[in-house]
Amino acid sequence: MIYLDYNATTPIDKSVAEAMLPFIHGSFGNPSSSHELGILAKEAVETARGQVAQMLGASPSEIVFTSGGSESNNMVIKGVANTYRSKGNHIITSMIEHPAVLNPCRFLEKNGYTITYLPVDGYGMVNPADIETAITEMTILVTVMHANNETGTIQPIAEISKVCRKRGVLFHTDTAQSVGKIPTRVNELGVDFLSVAGHKLYAPKGIGALYIRNGLSIEPLIHGAGHENGRRAGTENVIFAVGLGKACEIAGALSGVEQIRQLTDYFLNRMKERFGNKIRLFGHPAQRLPNTLYIGFSGVTTPAVLSALGDVAVSTGSACHSGATSLSSVLKAMGIRESNSETTIRFSLGRYTTQDEINAVLDKLSIMADEKAL
C-alpha cells in the first residue's frame, strides 16, 4: 500500500515504539505509588511532560496529558464555559472547525450558551477583524484551529490572539494537524490553551495533551482523584505518555519538513502539468500545511478516482467523519457549490513518503485520465 493519508493518522515512529517498550514489559508501576516502580513511572511521565512542553515552548507545569485531541478540545470549551459562566455565556469559533470543537459548542448551545460560528473566505481562512466585531461583553472564549485538516489552510493565529488579548478574551487553538509540520510555540502564537493529538505526530492513538497557560484554572472535564495536579483525574497512561513525549522530541525539530514540502510541491506541479484546468486546489495556495493537497477532479466520480488509485490510501475528506458522501462542511463554508461533476480527494504526505510512491500515484492518475478522457 502507498499511504497518503497522514492527516488521518500516522504510523508509530520506530523510536517512539522503542521508548515505550520498557514500560510495556517491566516498568509497570502506578505513578502515584511511593515504591520504586511507582517512582520510575512518575519520572517517566514527568520526562514526557517536559518533552511536550519543550516542543511547544511552554513550562512542564502547563501541560496536561489527555486521551487525545478530542478530549483536550472538550476540556477547554466545557471547562471555560463552566468556570467563567458568571462572566458571560458567549463563545466564538469558526464554521470549519473539527467536530471535536463544533459539537461541544452545539452541546453548550442547548444549555443556554450563545455560539458565534464565523465564516471563512474562499481559501478557508478566518478574518481576525471578524473576530473583533463578534466579541461582546459576554464573550469568554475564542477557539480557532491552527490548520484545517481537509484543506491544510493555516489560520492567522498570532493576529487573532492580539485581538483576544486587547479585548480580554481567552483564546484556544487546536494544533492536531500543525504540530510537527509548522512551528507551534505557544508564546509566538499567543494562545491561552492549545490541543495536541498524539496519533497525528507518530505517537499512539489514545494520547494527547492540553497546554493551559500558567495562572489559568478551569473546571476539570473528568472528576476523581488529584491526578495531573488536579486538572484531569485518572491514573496516568504511562506507556502512551512516554510515546507522546518521544514523538514531540522528534517533531519539535521539524526535521524532514522541508523535504515533505518539496515532495508535495512536486506532486502538485506534476498534476497541474498533466491535468491542467481539470483539477483545482482547495485551500490557500501558500498559507497551507507543507504536506496537504485537497484536489478537486472535474468530470470524474469519487468511486472512479478511488478505483484508479487502487491500493493508495487517501481520503475524500476527514477520516473522523468520512461517512458523509455530500460536499464537506469545510468546502461549503468556503463557498464551494455542490457539483456532481467534481470529486475531491485529500492527499496528505508524511515522514515515510517517497518520490517513487508519488510517481506511482501519478501514473495511476494518468491511466485514469486517459480512460475517462479527463
Image (spheres, grey):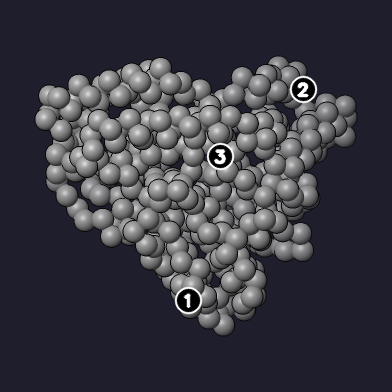
Q: Which residue does the numbered mark 2 point to in the structure image?
A: 27
- Left or right: 128 in relation to 223: left
Q: Residue at x 31, y 53 (%)?
A: 331
Which amino acid type is shown beneath numbered disc 3? Lys
* Residue 182 horizontal side relative to residue 8, left or right: right
- Name the residue rendered at 53%, 52% in the picture: 146
Nearer the observer: mark 2 or 1; the answer is 1
Q: Which residue position holds label 1?
A: 134
C-alpha span from label 1 to label 3: 30 Å
Q: Nearer the viewer, residue 270 or 9?
A: 270
- Which circle's residue, 1 or 3, is located before the other in the chain? 1
- Foreground residue, 312 or 25? 312
Q: Residue furthest right?
A: 35
Q: Tell me, yes or no, if residue 71 can be seen here.
A: no
- Residue 178, position in %: x, y? 54, 44
Residue under pointer 3? 181
